[in-house]
Structure formats: structure tokens, C-alpha cells
Image: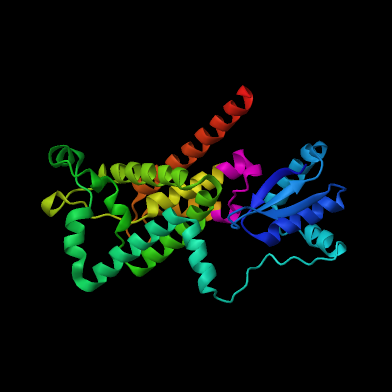
Amino acid sequence: MSHPLIAFRQQGVAHLLANYLGSQNITATVKPTETGDEFVVLLADDNDALKARAITEEFIQQPNNPKYQQAAWQHGENVDLVPSRQFDMKGFINNALSVPLTSIVFVLCVLVYGLSLLGLFSPIAQHLLMQPLSVLAENHEWWRLLGPAFIHFSALHIIFNLLWWCMLGAKIESTFGKSMLFVVFALSAIISNVAQAMFTTPVQGNLMLFGGLSGVVYAVMGFVWWLGWLKPQWGLSLPKSVIGFMLVWLVLGFADVLWVNMANAAHTAGLITGCLLAGLLSLGADKRKQGQ
């Protein structure tokens, strides 16, 4: 009976690990899931699980280490970790459908930005921008706690946020499902918007002129970062260079030396929210394991 070790979204990565395990006298195979969007590395002998997990954790940290390609070459298979540059519309649509919540948030942000470019920013802002909590308690327009996440003020703003959202949101959704991603998205959006509202002065109509998916982006970054540290066997991780960039960008925002206005409170609150959710998820998994 085969025993699952880890799953990857890229078939080449799964085969690369399986080949290296074979070079370490651990028999492993790769099998796609029923949906075909992930590839599971299976162990032939469960007695190899402990050694295989140690190798897997090292592999996750340094997948581009030449020793893995060397093992693949010795097994007669050269595995390319670089995806094809040829655009595949069918593959693009299938990928979008495999992570529906990631795709829905993406489409809503693009739709709102597109309508803003057509001259509809004012009516959109009137209905989505944040208001003081005291005002929301009277008018009960609680959707405004989420609303600012969908509003972007420039092409660079929306491109930067959606690139990170699509990459990391899709990772979270494909690994844990849309319910977990929804929790991360909703909580981080609400908490970051409320945090930023505490440092923003309302303008006409009690509206607060801040927006963007940045708080959520910092949350998904923090979520993946901490899970990569706490549970590397789950297959989520961020390169140290990305973590460094994220933290430096956060510090530069507080230093007020950038050419754009930064929602520092939203970014910080989002990052903390993502890290805490990752910690709670890891702790819950440990408790369930102990209870078995």
C-alpha cells in the first residue's frame, strides 16, 4: 500500500523529489489527485516515512539545489522547474476555476478599477469606502469593513497587489480550500481596514480615502511565511528574499520616505493577522495529532 508524503501543484517538482528519494534508497512514486490539479508523492514503505519527511523539509527549503537535478539525471529523467512560457488559454481557465475564491476577488478588483477608469470612481467610493465605526453603528453599512479592499487608485497599485494575491491566495486555496482562504481574506480585510480607520481623518460624507488589497496581501504573505516555518511539510513557503522585501517595505512606509502614501496601519494589522492565523492553524493541527 502506498503512503502519501506530500503534494505539489507542479508535476516536475513532485518528480524531482521522488527521484531524489529514490537515490536515497527510498522508493517513491508520483500520482495526480482526482481533480488533476495536484501531484502526490507516495512512499512504497511507511517505514521510510521519518527519513523521507526529513529529506522533504530540506527539499522545500532549497528545491533548486543541484543535487536534486543530479539525482534526476542519474535516474534518466531531467526535470525542468521552469514552467512553459507558452500561453495556454484552456490551462489558464482551468487554473482559475480550480481556485474560485482567488479568481472572484481578482475579478472584483479588476472590475471596480475598470469602472473607476470609466469615470465611476465617485459613486463606487460612495458605497465602498470605509466610514468611522460610530457612523457604521448608526447606518449599519457593515459591508464597508470589506469594501476598501476592492478599491485601487493606480495601475501600479492594483498590479502589485493582484500579483501577490493570485500567487499566494491560490497556494492557500489549493492547499487548504476556499473556506480557509475566505477566513484569511475576510478577517485580514476587516482588521486592516478598522486599524487604518483609526489613523485616518474622514472627509466629505464621513468617507475615509484609503483602499487596496495591501492589508490582505500582507496577511497572505504572513500566513504562508509562518506556515513555511512552523509546518514546512505542508509545502507552503516564501523565499527569504521575499520576506526581507516585505519587511523592508513595511519599515520604509513608516519612515515616510516613499513616493506614495502608505496605509501603514493596514499593512501591519494584515501581517499580524496572517501570522496569527498560521500559528493557530499549526497549533490546532498539533492538538488534533496529540488527540489521535
Taking the spot 54% from the left edge, 53% from the top edge, the residue there is: 171
Magenta span: 227-242
Is 144 magenta? The answer is no
User: Image check: 232 left or right of 283?
Assistant: right
Q: What kind of secondary structure does the magenta stretch mostly adopt?
A: helix
Q: State the colouring used for the structure image.
A: rainbow
User: In the rendered image of this protein, does residue 143 appear above or below residue 152?
Assistant: above
User: In the rendered image of this protein, does residue 115 appear above or below residue 283?
Assistant: below
Dividing the picture into quadrants, the one containing residue 122 is bottom left
Taking the spot 11% from the left edge, 52% from the top edge, the residue there is: 205
On the image, the x and y values in percent for residue 128 come to 23, 54
On the image, the x and y values in percent for residue 141 come to 19, 45
User: In the rendered image of this protein, does residue 94 appear above or below residue 219?
Assistant: below
Position of the C terminus by quadrant: top right
In this view, which residue lies farthest toward the top?
A: 291
User: In the rendered image of this protein, does residue 169 appear above or below residue 282?
Assistant: below
Position of the N terminus by quadrant: top right
On the image, the x and y values in percent for residue 227 come to 57, 42
Is residue 167 in view?
A: yes
Taking the spot 80% from the left edge, 56% from the top edge, the residue there is: 19
On the image, the x and y values in percent for residue 246 come to 49, 53
